[in-house]
Amino acid sequence: MQHAKITGWGKCVPPAVLTNADLMTFMDTTDEWITSRTGIKERRICHCNFSDMAIVSAQRALAAADLDPKDLDLILLGSLTNDSLCPNTASIVADAIGATNAAAIDINTACTGFLYGLHIGTNLIKAGAHRKVLVIGGEFISHYMNWSRRDVAVLFGDACGAVTIEATEDEVGLLASRIGCEADAKYAIQITNLGSAYSRLSDEFLYVGWNFQGQEVFKRAVKAMAYACEEVLKQTGLTVDDIKLVVPHQANQRILDALAKRLGIDADKVFVNVDKYGNTSAGTIPVALAESLEAGLIAPGDYVLTASFGAGLTWGAGLIRWGDRVTPLRESTAELPHCNQTALEVLAPHIARYNEHAKRNS
Ligand code: UT7
């Protein structure tokens, strides 16, 4: 039977850091509120295009696998913050990295975009339809942020990550996965005033708004991720005791604690970097995977559990058996364009626009 081994991994976090103290300079919030409610201390702000982060992540993952981009036959890219409506970002990445033989598909399931991509890519390899797949997940959420909304703006950050998966006879890679969607709660997270459902003639058009029912999402997230984790454990006949590391979606420290408690798994087996990056949506899992490997937390043959939830409300979990290699074969020299501004400087015009808009409407 075919399996899909994870052979390369890479992350790209933009250099500009926006701390809780930075947010306090233009928003009625406190470090104490943000830290106690979410665990977030800082997040990154992208100074270039989303595709730049996706391209650098992809090049780093390809180098780690020592894979020729011409050998890729599929690129799956999870994001809701693409460069443009058309062309799709996976095509922009394919062209930039020289993946001339790959199909290129964008997946818009918000925070679960990477996990959905890993599920789809793995199952296409298992079915024999593809052999070498690049799965990318990331977000440039600061571009779509409404900076007058303190309940939302403090939660998110920008980042991207990628993995390569390749056909193998070895029983490794994503051994089991379960994805789903609580579509009845689709408007619990909603980005408004952008898209064909909104009148182009309205003064509000392109002043991005957020409907965000945080507590509702919180409750559903814990329940759905725990359910999906139990499902993949059942599929593989494994128990939480077999799991070396949980690498979950990073939205909120309290959600991670509640998930660990519900699963009956030690909190110190749960990888956490939400303090450094906030919620980077589809970027959280590939960035966390890359950092788990950098930190030496995964050994050959380890079982790694991953889970996610996001707008839709989409959810899912995956059980990965790591392969025989936990270090990159090569390092990539790929870098983002240089950034000579602070995060506050990058955001200043954007924040001013939203503050003026909020004042006009108050
Ligand atoms: O990955 C998918 C997206 N992620 C999520 O949806 C995350 C899920 N939800 C959550 O993580 C939490 O629900 C939040 C962190 C979003 C909110 O935490 P909470 O404990 O549910 O707070 P709350 O919404 O009940 O807000 C409590 C208070 C409110 O004040 P009043 O009405 O009680 O006086 C808010 O106005 O906190 C106030 N508040 C803030 N205060 C200072 C909201 N945002 C802020 C802020 N700074 N940034």
Image (cartoon, rainbow, N blue to C red):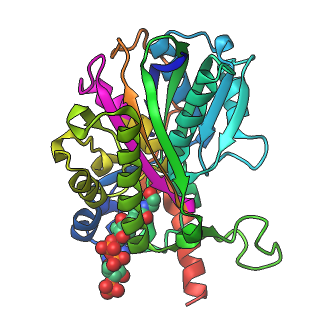
Q: Nearer the viewer, residue 278 or 49?
A: 278
Q: Is residue 266 magenta?
A: no
* Residue at the farthest right position: 201
351 w.r.t. 116: above or below: below
Left or right of 346 in this view: 16: left
Spot occupied by residue 347 in the image (x, y as percentages of width and height) = 50, 58
Report the residue at 70% width, 36% height from top: 105
Can residue 107 be seen at all in this image of the molecule? Answer: yes
Residue 136 sits in quarter: top right
Report the residue at 54% width, 36% height from top: 119
Quadrant that contains the N terminus:
top right
Q: Nearer the viewer, residue 171 or 297?
A: 171
Q: Is residue 293 magenta?
A: yes
Can residue 25 be seen at all in this image of the molecule? Answer: no
Which quadrant of the frame does ligand 1 lie within? bottom left
Report the residue at 68% width, 45% height from top: 83
Report the residue at 53% width, 21% height from top: 165
Quadrant that contains the C terminus:
bottom right
18 w.r.t. 130: above or below: below
Magenta part of the chain: 289-312
Residue 25 sits in quarter: bottom left
Spot occupied by residue 292 in the image (x, y as percentages of width and height) = 30, 31
Spot occupied by residue 339 in the image (x, y as percentages of width and height) = 48, 39
